[in-house]
Amino acid sequence: MNTLLLWLSIFLCLAAIGALQFRLFGGTVKTRSPGNVASFFLMHEIVDKQQRNLLSVIALIPLSFVFLIVAYHAETFGKALVQTYLEYFKQEKALEPFISPDLVSNIPEPLYPIIILVASFLIFGAQLRFLFIRIEKGVVFVTGVISRTNELLDEFSTALLNKLSYENVIEVLEAERQNKVPLAEEFEETPEKSKLSFELLHLAKSEVAGSGLRESLLKVLGNKFDEFLDDDDLSFLTGNGENEDQALESPPNHLINWFHIYAGAMAFVVVCGLYVGITPMAAEFFGAHEITWPKYEYFSDLAWSIAWVTLATIIPTIVGVLFFARRSENLHETRTQTLFMVLSLVFLFSLVVNFTFMVPWLIEVYVGERAGSDAGFGFPEFVYLFTHSLIPGFAVMAIALVDPQKILSRTDIIFAVGVICLGHLLAYLTFELAADMNIAYYWHQALLGFVLSTAALLILAVFCGVREIPAADRSPT
């Protein structure tokens, strides 16, 4: 009971820490520079609500993890803090009679996480805020939010200034508003493109959280500039500037940005590291319920499982999603044909990877057979290979069908994560039944699938964003 209360206390403290960081994200004052228009605005004024929430979750992980590690050894750190404070208060003669010698030993263990949390804010509040600001800046830099915002503002400003003078653009905008368009004093001596970028974003900022930056900028323009902008300009600004041949020949830049790939991979590796560090903590609890669970002494086995699921499930799913998004732009085949092609490739990809991971075991089996063992590649192994290779395809199918007009929407991610989590649970359960085993390891496999798929798809959504796909009579039939 004491252990349960301790974990409940840790959970409540983590919820408080996470909620505080979540609300603080994007609200800190940035270093403002005229060369960086986005630096003059808060996070919710340059990205939509969903993307801001994703970035907030990423940013709150480091400090929350540190607290979890400290709180897990709460009695040690808590006693040290309480003892330090007692020694300080004993110096005050007026308080000495109220301090019992047995006070430390009488504090219940579940209270220590709360003591650590409160003491940390009281003693290290300024340092923690500084750390959070640095983490926030790192997340924003790595995800490229600022650079993408400035690039999009540059596109709109350039398109307008190619057709009209700066004064004429402002005149049109002010005529609609019947008020002067504000301009920060830092931009008074900057080029006209920078001035116009700031003014467009200032007018659009109130709509960005709900509509996204591009849509908000288009709302600012409305139809006031239709007589000045030709169809090519409008198509470019709405994000539909590629013709069909270009769309089929090369992927968009944001899908082959190697910096984003590297940053996303690093973020995913961090999640895997956290998983390796945290998951074995529950081994004793699950062991008491006859559920096989990873332990610290079997670190290499857990790392092998993470690598296996990543390469056999997560990577094929991501490849399938991106390939489906690209192939959906092919107007010469139906959605059903596209989905069938993608699922076939994803299944083969996963099958090859799963079989490759089985090769070391097959070598051991071969050696065992040569030594007189009866082991071999039988029905249970075939069941494992086949069922686990189906999981990525079903995840891609969920993303393709749940929200047919969008890729990587919130609904897509929820259903895909659910499919991968449930898929690993059922696939490993089927394998255990076929092999006549009763180790209940499928619970861990479900958790592993849930954590890795959630991390991977959220990272993919942050870097690639929600993509709309053609809706013309291409729905599955």
Image: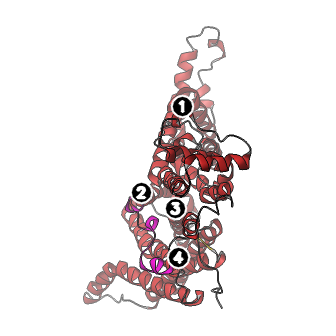
Q: Is residue 137 magenta?
A: no
Q: Secondary structure at mark 4?
A: helix
Q: Which residues are magenta?
A: 243-261
In terms of sequence position, does the residue under pointer 1 or pointer 4 come before the other? 1
Q: Which mark is residue 455?
A: 3
Q: Nearer the viewer, mark 1 or mark 4?
A: 4
What is the quadrant of residue 74 in the picture?
A: top right
Q: What type is the residue that disc 4 sits on? A: Ala
Q: Which residue is mark 1?
A: 79
Q: Nearer the viewer, mark 1 or mark 2?
A: 2
The residue most toward the right is 178
Q: Nearer the viewer, mark 3 or mark 1?
A: 3
Taking depth in this image into account, of 190 and 125 the one nearest to the observer is 190
Q: What type is the residue that disc 1 sits on? A: Lys
Q: Is residue 175 left or right of residue 366?
A: right
Q: Can residue 69 be seen here? A: no
Whether tag 1 and tag 2 are in contact, CB under 8 A, the answer is no
Q: Circle 1: is it few (<14), some (14-19), or many (20+) Cα within 10 Å?
A: some
Q: Which residue is mark 4?
A: 325
Whether tag 4 and tag 2 are in contact, CB under 8 A, the answer is no
In terms of sequence position, does the residue under pointer 4 or pointer 2 come before the other? 2
In terms of sequence position, does the residue under pointer 2 or pointer 3 come before the other? 2
Residue 325 vertical position relative to residue 119 in the rendered view, above or below: below
In terms of sequence position, does the residue under pointer 4 or pointer 3 come before the other? 4
Q: Position of residue 149 (x, y in %)?
A: 52, 52
Q: Position of residue 203 (x, y in %)?
A: 65, 47
What is the quadrant of residue 111 in the picture?
A: top right
Q: Position of residue 76 (x, y in %)?
A: 50, 36
Q: In 3D space, how far apart are the residues under numbered discs 4 and 2 (Cα atoms)?
A: 22 Å
Q: Which residue is mark 2?
A: 263
In terms of sequence position, does the residue under pointer 1 or pointer 2 come before the other? 1
Q: In 3D space, how far apart are the residues under numbered discs 1 and 2 (Cα atoms)?
A: 39 Å
